[in-house]
Amino acid sequence: MVKGYSVPLSPLGQANLASAPPWHYSSDVLAAEFWVDGDAARSLLPPNVTIDGTGAARAVIMYLDWQFTGSNDEMLDPARYQYRETFVLLDARWRDMAIAYCPYIFVDNDAAIMRGFTQGFPKKLGSVFQTRSFAAPSPAAAPVAAGSRFGASLSAHGERLADLRVTLREKVPDPTTVFNRPTVMRRYFPRLDGKAYDKPAVNQLTLSLTDNLHIVDLWAGEADVRLSEVRGEELHALAPVRVGRGFRFGMSYTVTDLRILEDYAA
Amino acid sequence: MVKGYSVPLSPLGQANLASAPPWHYSSDVLAAEFWVDGDAARSLLPPNVTIDGTGAARAVIMYLDWQFTGSNDEMLDPARYQYRETFVLLDARWRDMAIAYCPYIFVDNDAAIMRGFTQGFPKKLGSVFQTRSFAAPSPAAAPVAAGSRFGASLSAHGERLADLRVTLREKVPDPTTVFNRPTVMRRYFPRLDGKAYDKPAVNQLTLSLTDNLHIVDLWAGEADVRLSEVRGEELHALAPVRVGRGFRFGMSYTVTDLRILEDYAA
Amino acid sequence: MVKGYSVPLSPLGQANLASAPPWHYSSDVLAAEFWVDGDAARSLLPPNVTIDGTGAARAVIMYLDWQFTGSNDEMLDPARYQYRETFVLLDARWRDMAIAYCPYIFVDNDAAIMRGFTQGFPKKLGSVFQTRSFAAPSPAAAPVAAGSRFGASLSAHGERLADLRVTLREKVPDPTTVFNRPTVMRRYFPRLDGKAYDKPAVNQLTLSLTDNLHIVDLWAGEADVRLSEVRGEELHALAPVRVGRGFRFGMSYTVTDLRILEDYAA
Amino acid sequence: MVKGYSVPLSPLGQANLASAPPWHYSSDVLAAEFWVDGDAARSLLPPNVTIDGTGAARAVIMYLDWQFTGSNDEMLDPARYQYRETFVLLDARWRDMAIAYCPYIFVDNDAAIMRGFTQGFPKKLGSVFQTRSFAAPSPAAAPVAAGSRFGASLSAHGERLADLRVTLREKVPDPTTVFNRPTVMRRYFPRLDGKAYDKPAVNQLTLSLTDNLHIVDLWAGEADVRLSEVRGEELHALAPVRVGRGFRFGMSYTVTDLRILEDYAA
């Protein structure tokens, strides 16, 4: 008898890429808001998800240095469970609900891919870096303070997809004024049997449930966002028509559940 | 409207990790057969799959340097589409059919992970190397010839999981005398919604369909197989009780379909 | 005319692996002290460097998450200039001077290799991870506090060389009670011309000069150190006979100079 | 007493990045010739090395999949000793000698960096891929034959530096009609002591000595070469003004010695 939450199932249930929840996360985040061509945003949305109005659509790009732990001290094995991620969110609407829809996400860890697929995050492998803030004073320390500058980059297969620069200006007392939309994804697993390439086994609109969400030490300032054209990617279609504020903060939450908003296959 | 065979779906359908079949593959393979504890093999099998008899079970480990192409000249973009893989197969039986069941597989590429998940291969990320054979004569060339030695290694997250050494002795005229069982996998996607951790969305026994299969230049010889214990893995439970022949060959095939042998969820 | 501090020299002097100092560094460090067989320590030392006494020798292993900047905002390009490092130091003596001699060091970045070689650090490529401490509260956050646990690992070419676990117990008010010896290395570049393999072009005993050294937030506690035997490495000869305290702290300094203690080639 | 050819020196002499010669190499090579702005080429040359004439200068870019062995069966440990490399050569002249000068070279392995530095190759870390040719027939096989297409890419730190495409047309019977110039490098190790940043410890013009050189299965055809501008690199200053033939071949040789053409420091 095999055990485990995900493949590979195994006799002891220790080999699975993702073990059963709870999944606990804590991170440092470098982010920016920007506006993209409304049609470019709309063309990425699943059925019954819309963008308000006819003008540019608001997007957010986030770079995250993550630490994960489950129930087995995973954070003491950082070679397996520490990882880095970049994703884009589009301000959108499902029925009456204001949401942040995630069309693209890149990560450098296979356990994170599996936990992501399970929720509906369309993860690909990427190489992600962000300037860190260190306690020991130095021109290299990048303290979280007014005037400090941070950079971040996303590459895939040796090609640069996205660069971010942020200069901190001031602390934001209430993070919920900035980040207040739940994240929505499309959980989609294709079929191969019978060559049913366009009849997916799973095709759902899902909503991320984040218990014990904390956003701490949120700073805002100026930002620069660059999305580069790369063969095999379409991220650059979201190149900014305008860039808003940049952000740096800490974020943590726990995942144990998922809400299915719609089942497109039904 | 988004397009594509797999996530991420996108306006042009070019961002998907796996595009729709046909999927064409060609490889160099270093492999060995070995025997493992029968209970260890049995404990890895899904329902209705069995091992013959009560003694040791025959297993095969393969290291593959793969080149992939779909319909868009992917082989000209080797940074994205060339990859390396290691897997283990267990000689088993589903009903009356002699099969090779795949409990573990590691690969160094995300497109390969997605195509693998779609078929039921339980892929994790690994770092895979095998001695190659080069045409220019040198003590470093490792020609495919009697007496030539080859090594291969599999690591994950900086830990060595499996080492293989093969010394070639003679060419095998008919490859079908060695490799003649179809590969069977368990296609399994878990659920998170409603905390239904043990009620997978997809839970099927699948059979790999390989069109235009070619096995060429098959050589056999002696082998040494070492499987190491690593926290978070269970591969070492298949440590050899006896090692048989080692092999080196070329293999190619095309994938366009999949057969569902059983639907465990039904 | 080409410019630059190191190779590759280039017309604008921007392609060099290491640009001219100042080199500014800030880091988070996980470390432990341990004692090793005295003969094993002695057998690693260069001429005129000794270990006190006849018993076990004290060693320190450090894992460092580094951020580097030179004079060109390198810290805003973390894909190139953020890196991770593990090294071992042996308490030793050169003439009357108490020193910490560095026999082995691993790093994941090529600019760091070049700056290291220039000083005499015998750097090899490694894959280095340490548990990080995040501000957002979570079971995954690993705060710097009594009872918090941290792990760290070093691998090279897919093989695990060294594991460290530390449990924090108390803050150390004065870091100089723990870290107070200057680091000494052997700067050694071999020759190939005339097959003079044993007549190095450079063969010096060097002393690292660290301006503006800061050690902050030093905590101490228990530690576990494991050094594994790997073909092509000799680190495991320093396997602990006894493990002392573990440490976690921040460290920063600037490098602009180097002291040559002895020129063995002269 | 420590032993070894290069750092790190160690009691058994097994930890050194590069062991003493002989160094045996065999490879598959994808290459192209192209012409670059004459001033751009001249600005990369060391003292007493010149480009003929006033027009464009001929350059060659090579991508190499290498297998290395020394005297200890290194080729059986491909995770450590198999590597990939890209370099550029400029047709030049030292005194009366026609040479190929190497201004830039990238490699994905630390032992290769050390052996390279010892000879004078200015190696940086890069991620290198080339389309391979496999024996098993498939649209993915890329046979060495008229009409076959090959791609290659070089990236560093997640940014694409150079792309090559080659279409094979015909076999070249005599490789010496194409590759017939010895490779010349600048062996240069900077100093840090006394802040003598511009007084290198080693500053020599060196000539690579390749014993038992074999170039086999040389095919020629059309080529496309793209060099991209990347911050921190100057390779793109050699962007082609014209591209000539592309090549695919096997190459092997052994290194045991080096010739010093000039000692600039003397």
Image (cartoon, coloured by chain):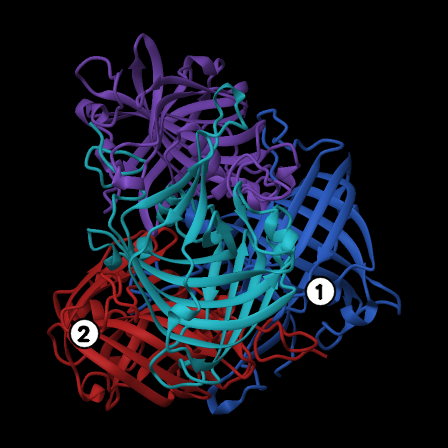
Chain colours: A cyan, B purple, C red, D blue
Q: Where is residue A196 in the image (x, y as percent from the top left)?
A: 52, 23
Q: Position of residue C70 (x, y in %)?
A: 51, 81
Tell me the SS state at disc 1.
helix
Chain for numbered disc 1: D
Q: Which residue is labeled 1 in the image?
A: D236
Res. C39 image quadrant: bottom left
Tell me which amino acid carries mark 1: His
Chain for numbered disc 2: C
| Pointers 1 and 2 within a single chain | no
Res C145 label: 2
Tell me which amino acid carries mark 2: Ala
Above or below A193: residue C70: below
Whether residue B78 is visible: yes
- Residue drawn at x 42%, y 48% is D79
Is B240 placed left or right of C206 in the picture?
left
Above or below A15: residue D96: below
Quarter holding the C terminus of chain A is top left
Quarter holding the N terminus of chain A is top left
Q: Which of B137 and C22 is in front in this view?
A: C22
Res. C127 image quadrant: bottom left
Is D223 placed left or right of C204 in the picture?
right
Res. D17 image quadrant: bottom left
Q: Which of C256 and A260 is in front in this view?
A: A260
Disc 2 residue crowd, few under 14, some 14–19, many 20+, Cα 10 Å: some
